[in-house]
Each structure stands twice: as structure tokens, then as C-alpha cells.
Amino acid sequence: MSAESSNLSNIEHRAVIKYFVKKGKAPKEIFEDMVSVLQESAPSYTMVKKWARLFQQGRESCEDDPGPGRPVTVVTEENVRKIEKLVLADRRIKLWQIAEELQISKERVGEIIQEHMNMRKISARWVPKMLTPFDKQRRLQTRVMQWTKKGERPQKKFKVQKSALKLMATIFWDSEGVLLIDYLPKGTTMNGQYYANLLAQTREAVVQKRRGKLSRGVLFLQDNASVHTARVSRQALKDTGFGNRPPTLQPRSSSQRLFPFPI
């Protein structure tokens, strides 16, 4: 037998094994006969034993069994429709997300999208929603990948502007209204020294806005926050001349007393 004719496929090997099984030969005899004819292209003894046993048990087909729970091919019209629905719902969906959703391989998903749906993944530009002069000068752009039909222009997405940062406000007031509002500068930490300065400003506000009340006595109410109990804060409170009411007690109503409460 020539070298070309001895190169049989797996199915042809199985057909030969099936023939010898029907003639009543044992697996070892079948293997030796096939090696003597096919030489290096002969199947292994393990394969011969496996298929000889299957044919002895009544198997007729020489084809491989399909994988459990999975069709022979996953490139079906149903899967194409499912993938198209997922892609159109989210143009930036990933291959692995589709594969997990449909329980098929990423390779088959990519094949369906590119070959059957005629789509590809390209960059969609992010552009600023509102361009500041600095933005116009830089023209910084970031990109995000999304699925589009071939020939379709990528969509633009507006870049969301950062919202204003949080701002801390300290308010001092009494029964007549607000005395002082202070906004903590950006990058500044509220500490004992900063709070002590606020107490001095509050005293000045009392002098300017509540004339005569400071001489009659001002009762100051605050909690036990660390900036309130710091040594420099306690000293500043004494320097203002305010009386300090413990935070667990409620101030008494009096027309001659002032109750500034810091937030």
C-alpha cells in the first residue's frame, strides 16, 4: 500500500475496526493487522480497544458523539438573533459577557458578530459637554469601544462635567438670627486654631449686631467635638467672655442671654 493510501482519517480507522470486529477478531489482532498495513499512521492500541468495545456493544456509527447539551454548531439563526439583540441594547457589550449569557464560546460570538452580523468594534470619541478655554486648548479626548455596522460612523458621547466640590460651612446664630457664616477654604482643615479664630470673629459679630448684649452676658452652647475641646479653643472661648453651657443641658430662655450655636 502506498504512503498516500495509508493515511486514513479517524472515521476510516473506525470503519476498519468495525469490519474486523464483525469478523470476530480480538482488539489485539486488529491492532497488529492495522500496524502491519498502515505502519506509523495506524491508530493506537488504546483507540482500537475503545472502538472495538463500542462496536461489540452494538454501536453502528463511526462518527463522534456531539457534546452533551450543545448542538453540533452554535452558529444558528436563533443565536444570531439573540446576539444582535444584546449588541443593539448595549453597543459596548463585551464578547465574554455575550458568551456567558448564551453559554457559547467567545470565538463563536466573535464569528457571528463579524461574519453574520457584519459588525465590528471601533472607538467612539468622548467630547466635552461644555468646553472651557483650557479644554479648547487641550482638546483632551478619551475613547470607549463600541459595536457598529461597517460603514457606520461612531457615535459621540458627551463628557460629564465634574460637579462642585462639597463645602463646609460653620454658622453661629442666636434667637434673633444668624450672627456669622464661615466657609472653610478649599484645602484647609478645621482644627482648634481655626475654630479659635472663628470664636473671635463671633465675638466681634455680637458686638456689631447685638449691641449691649455682650455686657449683659452671653451663654455659648457647643458640643464636645475635638475642635471645641482643644486647648486653644477653650482659651479662645475664655477670651471672648462667653459663658460655656455644657452640651447635655438646654439653655434657659432669657432676653438678656445670647445662645450662638456653631454647626
Image (tube, rainbow, N blue to C red):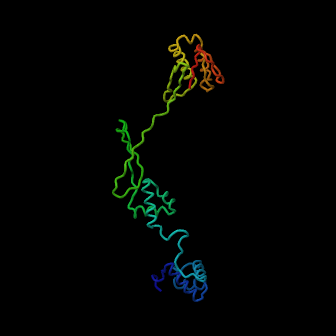
Nearest the eye: 227 or 179:
179
Q: Is residue 239 left or right of residue 136?
A: right
Is residue 121 shown above or below 14? above
In the image, what residue occupies the spot 40% across and 55% down? 147
User: Quick one: quadrant of the C terminus?
Assistant: top right
Query: Farthest bottom residue?
Result: 23
Is residue 184 shown above or below 256? below
Nearest the eye: 217 or 254:
254
Q: Position of residue 83 (x, y in %)?
A: 45, 60
Q: Quadrant of residue 75?
A: bottom left
Nearest the eye: 81 or 229:
81
Is residue 210 shown above or below 127? above
In the image, what residue occupies the spot 42% across and 41% down? 160
In the image, what residue occupies the spot 50% across and 23% down? 181
Q: Is residue 48 left or right of residue 129?
A: right
Q: Position of residue 100 (x, y in %)?
A: 51, 59
Q: Position of residue 172 (x, y in %)?
A: 54, 22
Nearest the eye: 51 or 173:
173
